[in-house]
Image: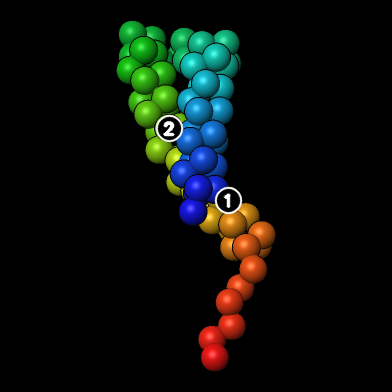
Amino acid sequence: MIAVSTGGTLVSLLLSTAVLFLGPRIGFEHFGKWSGVALIGTYVFAIIAGGLIGSVFGFLLGRKLLPRRQLA
C-alpha cells in the first residue's frame, strides 16, 4: 500500500523538522556541552517514531478506504 510508505515518510519528515526547528528554541541548553548530542539523538528518535506512527496511520487509512473482498 502506498499510503503506508507515504504516511511514514510525511510524519517522519514533519517530526524531524520540528525537532530541528524547535529543539534549540525550547531548551537543550540545560544539557550543557551535551546539548548537540541530545539534539541529534532526539532528531534520530523523531525520524524513527515518525516513520512508525505514519505507517500505522497510513495502514489504518488504507484499510478504511479500500473495499474489503468477501471470500466465497
Task: List x then y, in percent, for residue 25.
Answer: 57, 11
Quadrant into which the C terminus falls = bottom right
Viewer-nearest residue: 1 or 9: 1
Task: Identify which residue, 21 or 64, lies in the foreground.
Answer: 64
Q: Residues within 10 Å of mark 1 (few under 14, many from 20)?
A: some
The amino acid type found where label 2 is placed reads: Ile
Q: Which residue is mark 2?
A: 47
Coordinates of residue 59 in the picture (x, y in percent): 54, 56
Q: As drawn, which residue projects farthest toward the front?
A: 72
**66 w.r.t. 15: above or below:** below
Residue found farthest to the bottom = 72
Callout 2 secondary element: helix
Looking at the image, can residue 36 be seen?
yes
- Residue name at image x 54 percent, y 86 percent: 71
**What amino acid is at disc 1?**
Phe
| Residue visible at 41% across and 19% down in the picture | 39
Q: Earlier in the sequence, mark 2 or mark 1?
A: 2
Along the line of sight, the residue nearer the viewer: 47 or 39: 47
Q: Looking at the picture, how far across and down is residue 20, in whole percent?
A: 49, 16
Q: Residue at x 46, y 10 (%)?
A: 29
Residue pointed to by mark 1: 57
Q: Quadrant of residue 60?
A: bottom right
How packed mark 2 is, by other alpha carbons closer than 10 Å (few <14, some 14-19, many 20 or more), is many
The tally of labels here is: 2
Q: Is residue 59 left or right of residue 38?
A: right
Q: What residue is drawn where x is 57% and y is 16%? A: 22
Camera-side mark, 2 or 1: 1
Residue at disc 1, secondary structure: helix
Whether residue 50 appears in this view of the structure is no
x then y, percent, for residue 49:
45, 40
Is 8 positioned to the left or the right of 35 in the image? right
